[in-house]
Image (spheres, coloured by chain):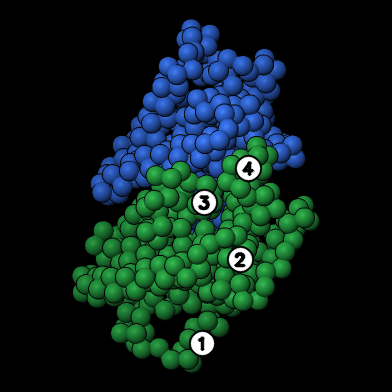
Chain colours: A blue, B green
C-alpha cells in the first residue's frame, strides 16, 4: 500500500519537474552540449596522460576509458537527481520552507531527495552507457548473466554511496545554514573518480578509500567490469553502501531534532 | 555609464569586504574546493608522466601550486549572482543608482579574493610541509608580473562572465551558458595539465584562444617555468580590449530589454 503511494507520488514529481525544466528548452540543449564536451575533455586529458606511457597505475588506455564511462554515468545521475534536490535543502532551511516539507504526510527524506529532476543529466547517463558498450568491444569482455548482475549490483552500490555522501553533507546545513560550498568541495573530490585509484600515491589512496570512498564509487565497478575484481572487494562495497545509507538516514533524523526553522 | 571615483570604489570595497568576512567559512570551503591541481600533480608525478615534457618533479609541483594560486585569485562567479538578482528583480534598485551594478559585483569579487588570501596561504603552507623540496621564492619582478597577469586573467574571465550574465536579460537563465564555457576553461587553461604537455595539433591553435592565458601563463611566470612573457601579456590585453566593448554593447542592449521581474 505504502510503496504504491510513493510510486504514485514519485510519478507526479517526475511530470511536474520535467514540465518546469522544459520551460527553459535552450537550457536543456546547452546542458546536453556541456555533457558531451565534458566527456570529450576528460578523454582529451586521458590522451595527454597516455601520450608517452601505456599504463597509469596498471590501467591501460582502453581500461581507463571504462572508469570514464562509469564516472560519466554516475555524474549524470548526480546531475539528474542529487544536485537539483540536495542543493534545494539549503534553500529550504534558509527560508524556513522546510516546515512545509515536514508537515506533509510523507517521508521528508523521500520528498527532499526526489522532488526534482533535471532531464539534462539523462544524456550523460546515455553517453556513459554508450562508452561502456564501446569498452566492452575494445576490451573483449564476455557478457553473461552473472557478469551483468555483478556489474549492476556494484553500480547500484556506487549510486547509494554517492547519494549518501551528498545527503550527509547537505544535512549539515541544518547547523551551518550555508553549506552549498561543502557540496562544491565534495564535487572537486569526486573529480578524482575519473582516474584509477592506483594512479595516486599511497597516502591519497588511503584518503580516498576511507574518508571519501571514491575508490568504491568508480574503481571497484570498473574492476568488476573488467572481470578483475576480487570477491572481498565486491562484498566490501556492498557493506559500505549499506552502512553509508543507514548512517545518512539516521543522521537526517538526528539533524531534524535540531531544526529550529527560520525567523521563529 | 562608468562614472566611478576613488571614494566610491573604496566604500564599495569596504562594504563588500565586511560582507565577505561574515562568510569566512564559506570562502574557506571555496578555497578547499580548488585543490584539484594538487590531485593532478599527484597523478603526474606518481606515474612519471612529466618525463616526456622535460619538466622535473620540483618544477611541476611549483607549476601546479602556482596554478592553484592563480585559480584562487581569478575565480569568477558573477553570472550566478547576477542571474539570481535578475530573477528576483533585485537588479531594479541597482539600476536606479548612478553606478553600474557590475562595479558592485566587481568589488564583491575583489573583497572575496582578499578574504580568501589567508586560506590560500594556509593551503600552500600545508603543501610545502608535504613537499619541502618544492619551496621557492620567486624574484620580485617575476612575482609582480605574475600578479598582473593573474589580475588580467581575472579581468578576462570577469568580462566573459559579465557578457554571459547580460544574456539574463533575454533568457533569464544564463548560468547554463557559463557551465558550457567552463568545460573548455577547465581542460584547456592548464589547470589539470600544463599547456606545454598538450599534443602538437592542439598547441598549434590554443595560443590564439584566451584559455592558456587564464591559468597556464600566470602560473608559468610565478613558478619560473619558461614562457613568452611579452606575447602572453599582449594576448591578455588583446582579449580584454576585445571583450570590453562587447560587454558594454550587450549591457546597453540588455538594460533596454530589462522588464523588471517581480515588480
For the N terminus of chain B, the image quarter is: bottom left
Question: What crowding class fits label 3: few (fewer than 14 Cα within 10 Å), some (14-19), or many (20 or more)?
Answer: some
Tell us which disc is closer to us: 1 or 2.
2
Residue that carries the numbered disc 2 in the rendered image: B222
Q: Earlier in the sequence, mark 1 or mark 4?
A: 1
Q: Is residue A15 above or below residue B130?
A: above
**How many numbered discs?**
4
Q: Earlier in the sequence, mark 1 or mark 3?
A: 1
Residue that carries the numbered disc 1 in the rendered image: B11
Using the rendered view, name the quadrant where residue B161 is placed: bottom left
Residue that carries the numbered disc 4 in the rendered image: B51
Tell us which disc is closer to us: 2 or 3.
3
Residue that carries the numbered disc 3 in the rendered image: B196
Q: Is residue B135 above or below residue B36?
A: below
Q: Are marks 4 and 2 on the same chain?
A: yes
- Identify the secondary structure beneath mark 2: helix
- Identify the secondary structure beneath mark 3: helix
Q: Earlier in the sequence, mark 4 or mark 3?
A: 4
Q: Are marks 1 and 3 on the same chain?
A: yes
Question: What crowding class fits label 4: few (fewer than 14 Cα within 10 Å), some (14-19), or many (20 or more)?
Answer: few
Q: Earlier in the sequence, mark 2 or mark 3?
A: 3
Amino acid at each position: 500500500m505504502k510503496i504504491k503511494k510513493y510510486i504514485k507520488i514519485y510519478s507526479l514529481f517526475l511530470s511536474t519537474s520535467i514540465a518546469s525544466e522544459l520551460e527553459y528548452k535552450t537550457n536543456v540543449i546547452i546542458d546536453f552540449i556541456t555533457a558531451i564536451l565534458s566527456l570529450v575533455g576528460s578523454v582529451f586529458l586521458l590522451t595527454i596522460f597516455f601520450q608517452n606511457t601505456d599504463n597509469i597505475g596498471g590501467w591501460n588506455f582502453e581500461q581507463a576509458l571504462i572508469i570514464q564511462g562509469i564516472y560519466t554515468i554516475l555524474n549524470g545521475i548526480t546531475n539528474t537527481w542529487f544536485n537539483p534536490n540536495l542543493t534545494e535543502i539549503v534553500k529550504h532551511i534558509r527560508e524556513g520552507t522546510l516546515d512545509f516539507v515536514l508537515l506533509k504526510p510523507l517521508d521528508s527524506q523521500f520528498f527532499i531527495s526526489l522532488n526534482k529532476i533535471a532531464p539534462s543529466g539523462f544524456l550523460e547517463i546515455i553517453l556513459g552507457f554508450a562508452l561502456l558498450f564501446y569498452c566492452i568491444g575494445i576490451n573483449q569482455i564476455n557478457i553473461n548473466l552473472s557478469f551483468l548482475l555483478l556489474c549492476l549490483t556494484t553500480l547500484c552500490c556506487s549510486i547509494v554511496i554517492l547519494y549518501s555522501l551528498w545527503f550527509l553533507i547537505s544535512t549539515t546545513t541544518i547547523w551551518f545554514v550555508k553549506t552549498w560550498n561543502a557540496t562544491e568541495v565534495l564535487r572537486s573530490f569526486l573529480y578524482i573518480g575519473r582516474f584509477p585509484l592506483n594512479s595516486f600515491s599511497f597516502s591519497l589512496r588511503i584518503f580516498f578509500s576511507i574518508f571519501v570512498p571514491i575508490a568504491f564509487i568508480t574503481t571497484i565497478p570498473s574492476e568488476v567490469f573488467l572481470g578483475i575484481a576480487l570477491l572481498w572487494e565486491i562484498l566490501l562495497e556492498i557493506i559500505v553502501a549499506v552502512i553509508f545509507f543507514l548512517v545518512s538516514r539516521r543522521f537526517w533524523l538526528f539533524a531534524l531534532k535540531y531544526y529550529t526553522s527560520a525567523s521563529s | 555609464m562608468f562614472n566611478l571615483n576613488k571614494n566610491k570604489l573604496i566604500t564599495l570595497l569596504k562594504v563588500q569586504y565586511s560582507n565577505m568576512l561574515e562568510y569566512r567559512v564559506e570562502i574557506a570551503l571555496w578555497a578547499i574546493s580548488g585543490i584539484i591541481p594538487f590531485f593532478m600533480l599527484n597523478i603526474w608525478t606518481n606515474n612519471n608522466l612529466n618525463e616526456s615534457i622535460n619538466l622535473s618533479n620540483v618544477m611541476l609541483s611549483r607549476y601546479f601550486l602556482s596554478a592553484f594560486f592563480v585559480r584562487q585569485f581569478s575565480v569568477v562567479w558573477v553570472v550566478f549572482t547576477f542571474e539570481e538578482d535578475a530573477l528576483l528583480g533585485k537588479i531594479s534598485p541597482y539600476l536606479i543608482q548612478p553606478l553600474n551594478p557590475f562595479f558592485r559585483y566587481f568589488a564583491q569579487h575583489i573583497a572575496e579574493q582578499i578574504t580568501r588570501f589567508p586560506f590560500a596561504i594556509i593551503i600552500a603552507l600545508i603543501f610545502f610541509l608535504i613537499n619541502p623540496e618544492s619551496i621557492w621564492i620567486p624574484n620580485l619582478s617575476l612575482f609582480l608580473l605574475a600578479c598582473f597577469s593573474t589580475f588580467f586573467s581575472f579581468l578576462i574571465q570577469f568580462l566573459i562572465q559579465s557578457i554571459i550574465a547580460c544574456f539574463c536579460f533575454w533568457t533569464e537563465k544564463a548560468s547554463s551558458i557559463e557551465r558550457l564555457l567552463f568545460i573548455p576553461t577547465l581542460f584547456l587553461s592548464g589547470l589539470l595539465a600544463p599547456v606545454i604537455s598538450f599534443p602538437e595539433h592542439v598547441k598549434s591553435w590554443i595560443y590564439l584562444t584566451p584559455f592558456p592565458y587564464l591559468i597556464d601563463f600566470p602560473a608559468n611566470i610565478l613558478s619560473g617555468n619558461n614562457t613568452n612573457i611579452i606575447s602572453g601579456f599582449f594576448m591578455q590585453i588583446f582579449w580584454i580590449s576585445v571583450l570590453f566593448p562587447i560587454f558594454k554593447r550587450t549591457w546597453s542592449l540588455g538594460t533596454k530589454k530589462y522588464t523588471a521581474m517581480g515588480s
